[in-house]
Amino acid sequence: MDFKRIVITGAPGTGKTSVIKSLENSGYFCFHEIIRTMTLEAIENEETDALQNNPIDFVSDAASFNQKLLKGRLEQFKQASEIKKDIVFYDRGVPDVLAYMDYFDQSYGDDFVNICQTNRYNKVFLLPPWKEIYKQDNERLESYSQAVDLHEHLEKTYSSFGYEIIEVPFGTVEERLKYILNNTQT
């Protein structure tokens, strides 16, 4: 079955999760962001009082954490072929792992790059930082300033893999949903 793989990505606090929930409520299949669960696990397992950043930065074994994250995103990519839908949405894609690693100045091998090159999405929607809605919480540990920097890293990473990035304008969840769906059909 031919189907479209659509990534919804963006830095923390951009409204991405609300858009994903709206897509699901409209009957679309969405793979959820796996980093939130991994973040909670990392917080429980790490022996540090200073968990004030992304787990990629504070875990004791960042390489293993990133490998696990990449493996999880790759599994989602592969599982999509079993879904009987015309469109499958992803709350973040495989290249997000590299963007975050670049942001935190962490190295990765050719295996990470090869996975991004060979597992391709049809479209990538990027939600820009939005100061008015930005809020930190137990899983969203980055400041707004860091979110802006992460946005730039996401844009740069997806572009480096040849993706045409579609930036989603600010608006209500419904307006953003409509924008994404209209641009998914083309």
Image: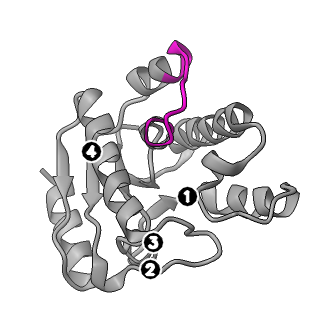
Residue at image coords 21%, 55% = 184
The image's mark for residue 17 is 3
Q: Nearer the viewer, residue 89 or 176?
A: 176
Q: Which residue is mark 1?
A: 33
118 lies above or below 152:
above
Q: Could you say where residue 97 lies in the image, as x and y percent from the top left?
A: 51, 40
> Where are the magenta residues, as a range?
101-112
Quarter occupied by residue 64 = top right
The image's mark for residue 155 is 4
Q: Which residue is mark 2?
A: 25
Disc 2 versus disc 1: distance between alpha carbons?
17 Å
Q: Evaluate if marks 3 and 1 touch, with contact meaning CB atoms under 8 Å apart.
A: yes
The image's mark for residue 24 is none
Disc 3 versus disc 1: distance between alpha carbons?
9 Å
Looking at the image, is mark 4 or mark 1 earlier in the sequence?
A: 1
Amino acid type at mark 1 = Glu
Disc 4 versus disc 3: distance between alpha carbons?
18 Å
Q: Could you say where residue 67 lies in the image, as x and y percent from the top left?
A: 66, 32
Disc 4 versus disc 2: distance between alpha carbons?
28 Å
Is residue 103 a member of the stretch shown in magenta? yes
Amino acid type at mark 3 = Thr
Residue at image coords 44%, 79% = 25
SS for tag 2? helix
Looking at the image, is mark 3 or mark 1 earlier in the sequence?
A: 3
Color scheme of the displayed model: one colour
The residue mark sitting in front, 4 or 2, is 4
SS for tag 3? helix
